[in-house]
Amino acid sequence: MEFKELFEMQRQLDAFIEQTQNVNRDVFKEKGLALMIELAELANETRCFKFWSTKGPSERAVILEEFVDSIHFLLSLGNEKGLTLESWPEIKMQEDLTDWFLRTQEAILTFIQHPTENDYREVWQYYGVLAYNLDFTLDDVIGAYIEKNEKNYERQRTGY
């Protein structure tokens, strides 16, 4: 499977959710806030900012699941604005995670307030850097996305 196919999978999931939940209004801002929350949950699982704690990060699988929770909303926001990417932004830059989480939050907020193609691509680039620093490959992301996508359908069917 190619990265760009995730946009169609997300479009189908969003249509299913909107039908199941009877959503008939613009939820772009809500999805934007959800993306910011998911990024914060990802940061929390890495524990990169918790200087006061000696406990290490969560297991890789937990961190990856949080990462793809963000990817769901990022794809969804792009679909809402007719924006897409042809390929995964593979950017190999070793960065401080705390700094990068803050920069990514800022980029997301900018995109939510001014949803341009350039701002959307910038958010993806930041996620590419996060993936590199978390040691996630494109195959990791696609596999975890597909697994979580199926779980999201099941949650809708069971009244999540």
Image (cartoon, grey):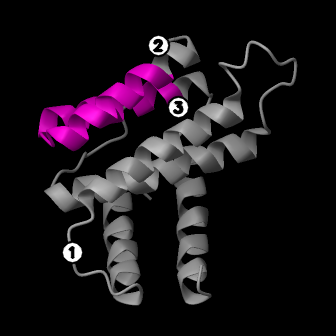
Q: Position of residue 83 (x, y in %)?
A: 17, 51
Q: Residue at x 62, y 88 (%)?
A: 158
Location of the N terminus by quadrant is: bottom left
- The image quadrant of residue 15 is bottom left
Residue that mark 3 sits on: 131
Q: Quadrant of the C terminus?
A: bottom right
Q: Residues within 10 Å of mark 2 (few under 14, many from 20)?
A: few
Q: Earlier in the sequence, mark 1 or mark 2?
A: 1
Q: Is residue 115 above or below residue 43?
A: below
Residue in the image at 72% along x and 19% along y? 50
Residue 25 tag number: 1
Residue 141 image point, x, y percent: 54, 47
Kindly check if marks 2 and 3 are in contact, taking CB atoms under 8 A apart as contact.
Answer: no
Kindly tell me whether residue 75 is visible in this rendering: no
Q: Main secondary structure of the magenta part?
A: helix
**x%, y% of residue 2?**
39, 54
Question: Which amino acid type is shown beneath numbered disc 3?
Answer: Ala
Name the residue at 87% across, 24% down.
55
Residue highlighted by disc 2: 93
Magenta segment: 101-130
Please indicate whether residue 149 sits to the left or right of residue 51 in the image: left
